[in-house]
Amino acid sequence: MIDAPAPVGMVADLFEPEPATWGLRGDPYLWRSMRTMLAKQVLPTAERDLVEILRSSFRWLTGNDLQDTSTDRIYREELARGGMTSGQVDLEVWRNVLVPLLVERWRIVAPVGSAGPSVTQGPASHSSR
């Protein structure tokens, strides 16, 4: 079996440009931390591998699993920069908007036939707040 060629670039490349809107004030700082963390990580050939890289990085930086739906926001002191929701990360936005955005950007650069089954969503669906 021949493996599909790897997409060209690093996972951090998917983080540019930044989204125009965020959920909570900690989200852009987490986004930038993940981009820095993944600067030397080569883009994977399978979508499921990308999702795992993103989930693992998120877990490493926040101590929370994106698939844990018991809460919709977390607080991380290192992401606090002032403001009412400073340091807070919107888990629903990461699950439903930001991770899918990164996966969609990967699909654009991935070779044909390398996108595996989509696994961007967690086990439970979420309604709007």
Image (spheres, helix red, strand yellow):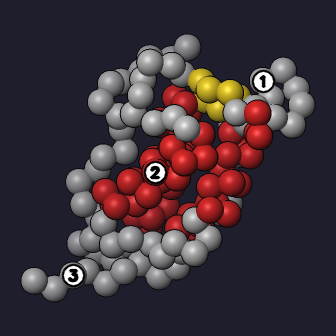
As rendered, which of 44 and 62 lies closer to the eye?
A: 62
- Where residue 55 appears, x then y in whole percent? 45, 48
Give the amino acid type for the residue marked by disc 2 in the picture. Ser
Give the amino acid type for the residue marked by disc 3 in the picture. Asp
- The secondary element bearing badge 3 is classed as loop
Seen at 74% across and 46% down, the residue is 29
- The secondary element bearing badge 1 is classed as loop
Judge from the rendering whether residue 45 lies leftward or rightward of residue 77; answer left or right: left
Seen at 41% across and 28% down, the residue is 68
The residue under label 2 is: 56
Distance from Cα at disc 2 to Cα at disc 1: 24 Å
Q: Earlier in the sequence, mark 1 or mark 3?
A: 3
Give the amino acid type for the residue marked by disc 1 in the picture. Thr
Mark linked to residue 97: none
Distance from Cα at disc 3 to Cα at disc 2: 24 Å
Mark linked to residue 3: 3
79 w.r.t. 105: above or below: above
How busy is the neighbourhood of tag 1: few (under 14 within 10 Å), some, or many (20 plus)?
Answer: some
- The secondary element bearing badge 2 is classed as helix
Judge from the rendering whether residue 113 lies leftward or rightward of residue 35; answer left or right: left
How busy is the neighbourhood of tag 3: few (under 14 within 10 Å), some, or many (20 plus)?
Answer: few
